[in-house]
Amino acid sequence: MNKKLIIGIAGVLVVAGGIWFFTGKSSKGGISLETAKVNRSSISNTVTATGTVEPVTEVEVGTQVSGIIDKLYADYNDVVKAGQLIAEMDKVNLKAELASAQAQLASSKSEYEYQQKNYARNKVLYEKKLISDSDYETATYNYEKSKASYEQNQAAMVKVNRNLEYATITSPIDGVVINRAVEEGQTVAAGFETPTLFTIAADLTKMQVIADVDEADIGNVHDGQRVSFTVDAYPNDVFEGTVWQIRLGDSSSSSSSSSTSSSSTVVTYEVVITADNPDLKLKPRLTANVTIYTLERDNVLTIPTKSLRFVPEEELLVGTGLIAENSAQEAPAGKRLVWVKEGQQLHPKAVTVGSTSGNMIEVIDGLNEGEEIAVDLTSDAPAQAAAPTEKSPFMPGPPGSDKKKK
């Protein structure tokens, strides 16, 4: 009787142990398989930067002569045409210089003509041996000197006429005046640098953004990529553009911290983005927050990137009731391995992957839309409570803990 009782108890213990082993992880441990469907979606990668809105063509109009601004015929926001008069400088001094140059030219011309005739006469007399070598050489010297003086005054006349023309300032292009830097009566000095009087933008319906892209991102930026950007003036509007040029010269800027007495150099590259501005909302010098789409793939098969790292561990799969076929299989060269769930079985499939964007990756071949793939094994088991630590008899307890219970 005792023997049968012992055998019965042992059998119960074996069955209970088997139930715990096969179902304990699923019920207490909460092991479950996370899956995802293979579907079609769009993936994209972006680069963000800040930039400044600028006109595509911007011309600074200056003057090459010094003097006083006599008249202004253009102001801010005025639409001007190429060749249109926009300013005049005081011409009194320039006209006086012109009159002086004309007098000098006339004088040098008379001297030249006289010396030319004198030289011709002395040349004939010298050939007939009627004058000395000294007289002939003197006549030749005076002739060459008067000729050089006449030519010099002719050149000076051209310069004075040109300066007088520079006093009449016209627009070099069709456009809009976006800046006027002078007032009537103001004196400008054209020394080593030409003073700027007006800034004219050619066409404000075509704008460009000069964006500073970090050196870590510039390798992904190429001509023709789509760009979207916003400006603080219109926070609810998103403007579209296209990468037109990547300038090879870097725009390095240094930043320093006085508290740590250290400095660092930030290297950025200028990226020129063209944008249409039909409603003239974009104004010169606005700050733009730029997003450059370095990758855009539409309507492609995608799966979670995490699924490529999934490994079917048999010990963990037991609690889920799933069976993995060929769990030791490895992916062929140039391919990756994913596990497709069909019922309670996991089958390995070799796939070719393409572009990746964050947590999703493109599948070029190897999978069909709608297939269910394994992503990860997750556990919902609560965290185990910390094991109680043995208290040292020498460690003081909280106040009142040393009181004896009555």
Image: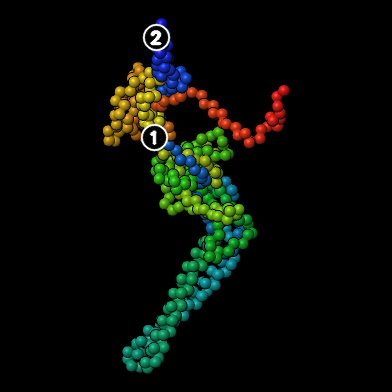
Residue 331: horizontal and vertical position, in percent? Answer: 29, 32
The answer to whether residue 62 is left or right of residue 117 is right
Pick the residue in front: 182 or 225. Answer: 225
Give the residue furthest to the left: 332
Question: For the residue carrying disc 1, how many other residues have a C-alpha within 10 Å: few (<14), some (14-19), or many (20+)?
Answer: some
Residue 82 appears in the figure = no
Residue 360: horizontal and vertical position, in percent? Answer: 41, 31
Pick the residue in front: 161 or 31. Answer: 31
For badge 1, the amino acid type reads Thr
Q: Do the residues labelled 2 and 1 touch (CB within 8 Å)?
A: no
For badge 2, the amino acid type reads Lys
- What residue is at 32 percent from the left and 91 percent from the top? 128
Q: In which quarter of the image is the C terminus?
A: top right
Q: Up-down: is 43 above or below 76?
A: above
Q: Up-down: is 226 above or below 169?
A: above
Give the residue furthest to the top: 1
Q: Up-down: is 236 above or below 247?
A: above
- Measure the C-alpha gap from mark 2 to mark 1: 67 Å
Residue where numbered disc 1 is placed: 356
Q: In which quarter of the image is residue 5?
A: top left
Residue where numbered disc 2 is placed: 3
Pick the residue in front: 176 or 276. Answer: 276
- What residue is at 71 percent from the left and 28 percent from the top? 403
Q: Up-down: is 82 above or below 229?
A: below
SS at mark 1 in the image = strand
SS at mark 2 in the image = helix
Q: From the image, state whether disc 2 or disc 1 is nearer to you.
A: 2
Residue 388: horizontal and vertical position, in percent? Answer: 56, 29
Protein image colouring: rainbow
Q: Quadrant of residue 301?
A: top left
Residue 136 appears in the figure = yes
- What residue is at 51 percent from the left and 45 percent from the top? 51
